[in-house]
Amino acid sequence: MQADETLDCFGLMCPMPIIKTAQAVKKMKIDQVLEIVATDKGIKQDMPAWCKTTGNECLAIEDSGEDIKVYVRKARD
């Protein structure tokens, strides 16, 4: 999947990936896609919940076993 920006959350534990995602998404334009690279397995549940709460869109979650990539589209300001 093509992302406009990548956020490195490798090694960070909850809630830091969500906090850093919120900060990064704030700076993006509507419809841009953010790729979050993380190792905390909790992101697979946390990010879709965060997107639902904030009105953004969780496009995909890819778990390679070594890291997890989550793609979020900014849906609103």
Image: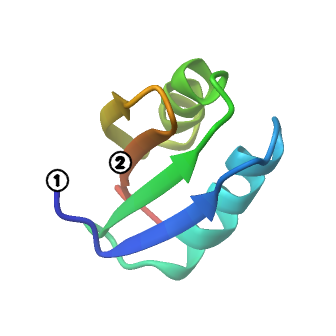
Q: Residue at x 17, y 63 (%)?
A: 2
Q: Residue 30 placed where, x, y %?
A: 32, 70
Closer to us: 11 or 16: 11
Task: Give the farthest residue toward the left.
Answer: 1
Q: Residue 34 placed where, x, y %?
A: 40, 62
Task: Say what amino acid the circle numbered 2 marks.
Answer: Tyr
Task: Give the label on residue 1, or none.
Answer: 1
Q: Residue 69 placed where, x, y %?
A: 42, 43
Q: Which residue is mark 2?
A: 71
Q: Residue at x 29, y 70 (%)?
A: 32
Q: CA distance from mark 1 to mark 2?
A: 8 Å
**70 is higher (above) or lower (below) than 64:** below
Q: Is residue 40 left or right of residue 75?
A: right
Task: Give the label on residue 37, or none.
Answer: none
Closer to us: 47 or 30: 47
Closer to us: 73 or 10: 10
Q: Residue 58 placed where, x, y %?
A: 36, 37
| Neighbours of disc 2 within 10 Å: few (<14), some (14-19), many (20+) | many
Mark 2 residue element: strand
**73 is higher (above) or lower (below) than 45:** below
Q: Residue at x 42, y 42 (%)?
A: 70
CB atoms at circles 1 and 2 under 8 Å apart? yes
Give the quarter of the image for residue 3: bottom left
Mark 1 residue element: loop
**57 is higher (above) or lower (below) than 31:** above
